[in-house]
């Protein structure tokens, strides 16, 4: 059985203007030891997907669907059950911009200790904290430091170490390299590769396909709140099917090619009171009359695509 199964997950936010359908009927699975990348433009629902799985939605509601983690239905659990047995222990998250939310008035050691205490870990704090810091190549002396004494790259390693404190099998990392300089980005990616070898799986949420391709065996492409294509990294890059996936790949610069990146004309659809039909219809060069209905899911070699061109 896969380690994580997400089935027909829909999550929305209620606003005074109506419902924002941030995640609509998203399904995918990942096996233990695999890593998955979730890619797409800003506001396509990828962060909400991560927060729904982590059960840390602020103001949002999971409306329907199932999430099975290690065979157990986590949406059917009480908050207390999930916090006691799953959050941080089997599944943790590096939140977007987390390195900027380290508390400036406490040392890293105090902040790590708080996390351990909150999750019922009462003994051997120093050993656990030291091991977590060493796993991200940081000296345990960092425990005595305040956040302002650390560089951006060190702070990002600290929040990754914090996510690893209780040795979860899956870490959801939301834009973990955004706002870091190129050198530090590559250090963080190398760190993820090393942690993968030590059996930590990642769900890497990023707008940057190049970052995802370095780490992940599987990729889910999100557009307008839906996962429009899902498959192996190889298939997504070599034989992308959905017109949005194709356009997204062409929009990134390639190192060994003279081809200039092509931007995607138009802008993403609003998720407020989303209408039926393919969400890419306004920007798709292949749009047809029938695309005003919702495309069904069609199997591909390693996953699926939602587009009338393949039905
Ligand atoms: Fe384009 Fe239609 Fe496919 Fe949507 S369903 S991506 S509009 S061809």
Image (cartoon, rainbow, N blue to C red):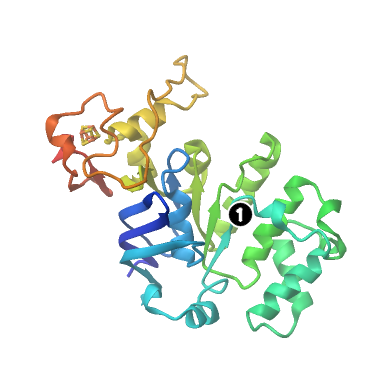
Please give the name of the residue rendered at 67% of the width and 44% of the height, measured from the top-left corner. Answer: 187
Please give the name of the residue rendered at 41% of the width and 80% of the height, measured from the top-left corner. Answer: 77
Split into quadrants, the picture shows ligand 1 in the one at top left
SS for tag 1?
helix
Whether residue 164 is visible to the viewer of this picture, yes or no, is yes
Circle 1 is placed at which residue position?
A: 194
The answer to whether residue 286 is left or right of residue 21 is left
| Residues packed near mark 1 inside 10 Å, few (<14), some (14 to 19) or many (20 plus) | some
Foreground of the two, 205 or 188: 205
Location of residue 199 in the rendering, given as x and y in whole percent from the top left corner: 53, 63
The answer to whether residue 230 is left or right of residue 208 is left
Q: Residue furthest front?
A: 16
Foreground of the two, 287 or 240: 287
Please give the name of the residue rendered at 34% of the width and 62% of the height, measured from the top-left corner. Answer: 6
Whether residue 20 is visible to the viewer of this picture, yes or no, is no
Which image quadrant is residue 109 in? bottom right
Foreground of the two, 198 or 226: 226
The answer to whether residue 55 is left or right of residue 308 is right
Location of residue 134 in the rendering, given as x and y in whole percent from the top left corner: 74, 62
Q: Quadrant of the C terminus?
A: top left
Location of residue 92 in the rendering, given as x and y in whole percent from the top left corner: 55, 65
Foreground of the two, 229 or 190: 229
Image height of 107 relative to 259, above or below: below
Image height of 57 relative to 74, above or below: above
The answer to whether residue 184 is left or right of residue 210 is right
Q: Quadrant of the N terminus?
A: bottom left
Please give the name of the residue rendered at 38% of the width and 64% of the height, measured from the top-left corner. Answer: 62
């Amino acid at each position: 059985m896969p380690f994580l199964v997400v089935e027909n997950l829909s999550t929305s936010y209620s606003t005074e203007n109506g419902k924002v359908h941030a995640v609509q009927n998203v399904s995918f699975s990942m096996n233990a030891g695999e890593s998955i990348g979730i890619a797409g433009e800003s506001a396509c629902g990828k962060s909400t997907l991560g927060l729904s799985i982590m059960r840390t939605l602020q103001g949002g509601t999971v409306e329907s669907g199932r999430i099975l983690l290690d065979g157990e239905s986590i949406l059917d659990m009480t908050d207390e059950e999930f916090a006691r047995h799953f959050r941080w222990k089997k599944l943790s998250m590096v939140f977007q911009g987390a390195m900027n939310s380290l508390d400036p008035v406490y040392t890293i050691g105090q902040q790590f200790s708080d996390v351990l205490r909150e999750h019922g870990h009462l003994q051997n704090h120093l050993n656990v904290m030291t091991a977590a810091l060493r796993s991200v190549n940081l000296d345990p002396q960092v425990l005595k430091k305040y956040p302002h004494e650390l560089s951006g790259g060190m702070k990002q390693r600290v929040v990754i170490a914090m996510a690893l404190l209780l040795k979860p099998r899956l870490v959801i990392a939301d834009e973990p390299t955004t706002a870091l300089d190129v050198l530090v980005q590559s250090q963080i990616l190398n760190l993820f590769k090393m942690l993968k070898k030590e059996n930590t799986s990642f769900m890497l949420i990023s707008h940057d396909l190049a970052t995802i391709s370095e780490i992940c065996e599987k990729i889910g492409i999100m557009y307008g709140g839906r996962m429009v294509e899902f498959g192996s990294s190889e298939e997504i890059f070599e034989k992308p099917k959905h017109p949005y996936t194709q356009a997204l790949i062409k929009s990134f610069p390639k190192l060994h090619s003279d081809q200039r990146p092509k931007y995607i004309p138009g802008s993403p659809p609003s998720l407020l009171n989303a209408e039926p039909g393919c969400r890419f219809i306004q920007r798709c060069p292949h749009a047809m009359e029938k695309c005003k209905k919702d495309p069904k899911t069609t199997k591909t070699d390693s996953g699926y695509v939602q587009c009338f061109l393949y039905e």
